[in-house]
Image (cartoon, grey):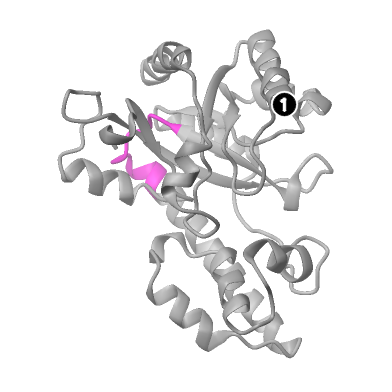
């Protein structure tokens, strides 16, 4: 990571902190040193939101700086993972009833994946392997996405509960890859009322990175509402290489100081 010019990184797996614990046990430090970048504990929670403001019926809430050994937070994440597994099983059942069984291909995909991050992208890859989809994006657009034949609604935390859980574990809650924020400021304000502390302003993106204009608009919202600006690659390992994901994700140096200050404030909250 240091060779890539990274000074500060956060691993934000979905509903899991095991990767953070693994890296720290391997010697990766929480603060930057000459030997490598600092590692911030992170997580991404897909929060259920049935309103028109949410893509796929969910908002993605990032948590930064939580105590990775917080037992209550780990129990919350375990419930999230269990709900996601139920959703996947129901999706597989629906695909069988639609005449698109992918169980064998799914088992192969999962065998090579992290079991803690089981989700619909694995089903999408199984659909690709069986010839039912051309890509992950195609699988979601035609088969798995909201309004499609095999769509199964998510179970789990809503945005308020996700933000509350992150804050209770000493973390900073950030709204992730929400390019619609300039048109939906009322939603952002509602999340702020629940404790949201940041907005992802710089985004490399799995599908489409933010444009210069989108970044500027999001930065203006963050400044105007006292939110910390953050940045992320949204790298999931299935649409591009890690090198490509990092190359298209540019987070300015000036983000670091206010971000670290916000993390310290989050840890110091009573």
**Image quadrant in which you'd find residue 170:** top left
Helix, strand or loop at label 1? It is helix
Residue 152 can be seen in this image: no
Residue plotted at (47% across, 37% down): 247
Residue plotted at (75% across, 71% down): 143
Residue in front for this viewpoint, 166 or 127 = 127
Residue in front for this viewpoint, 260 or 51 = 260
Residue plotted at (80% across, 39% down): 53
How many discs mark residues in the rendered view?
Answer: 1
Q: Is residue 69 magenta?
A: yes
Residue 245 placement (x, y as % from top left): 49, 44
State left or right for residue 181 relative to residue 115: right
State left or right for residue 2 relative to residue 223: left
Residue range highlighted in magenta: 64-74
Residue 219 placement (x, y as % from top left): 65, 17
* Quarter in which the N terminus is drawn: top left
* Quarter in which the C terminus is drawn: top left
Residue tagged by mark 1?
214
Residue in front for this viewpoint, 52 or 80 = 52
Residue 53 can be seen in this image: yes
Residue 86, placed above or below residue 43: below
Residue in front for this viewpoint, 103 or 136 = 136
Q: Is residue 139 magenta?
A: no
Residue 99, placed above or below residue 203: below
Residue 226, placed above or below residue 215: above
Residue 132 placement (x, y as % from top left): 69, 80
Residue 125 placement (x, y as % from top left): 56, 72
Residue plotted at (55% across, 57% down): 239
Q: Crowdedness of circle 1 by 10 Å Cα count: few (<14), some, many (20+)?
A: some
**Image quadrant in which you'd find residue 256:** top left
**Image quadrant in which you'd find residue 161:** top right
């Amino acid at each position: 990571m240091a060779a890539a010019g990274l000074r500060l990184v956060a691993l934000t797996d979905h509903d899991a902190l095991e990767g953070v614990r693994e890296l720290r046990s391997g010697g990766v430090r929480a603060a930057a040193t000459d030997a490598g970048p600092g590692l911030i504990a992170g997580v991404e929670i897909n929060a259920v939101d049935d309103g028109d403001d949410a893509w796929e019926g969910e908002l993605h809430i990032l948590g930064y700086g939580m105590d990775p050994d917080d037992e209550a937070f780990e129990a919350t994440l375990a419930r999230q993972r269990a709900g996601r597994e139920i959703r996947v099983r129901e999706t597989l059942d629906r695909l069988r009833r639609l005449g698109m069984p992918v169980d064998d291909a799914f088992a192969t995909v999962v065998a090579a994946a992290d079991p803690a991050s089981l989700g619909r992208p694995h089903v999408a890859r199984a659909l690709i392997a069986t010839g039912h989809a051309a890509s992950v994006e195609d699988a979601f657009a035609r088969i798995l996405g909201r309004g499609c034949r095999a769509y199964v609604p998510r179970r789990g935390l809503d945005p308020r509960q996700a933000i509350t859980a992150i804050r209770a574990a000493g973390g900073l809650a950030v709204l992730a890859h929400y390019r619609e924020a300039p048109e939906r400021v009322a939603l952002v304000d509602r999340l702020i009322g629940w404790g949201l502390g940041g907005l992802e302003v710089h985004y490399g993106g799995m599908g489409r990175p933010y444009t210069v204009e989108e970044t500027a608009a999001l930065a203006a919202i963050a400044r105007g509402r006292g939110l910390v600006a953050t940045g992320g690659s949204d790298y999931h390992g299935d649409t591009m290489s890690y090198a490509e994901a990092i190359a298209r994700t540019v987070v300015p140096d000036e983000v670091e100081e206010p971000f670290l200050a916000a993390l310290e404030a989050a840890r110091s909250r009573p």
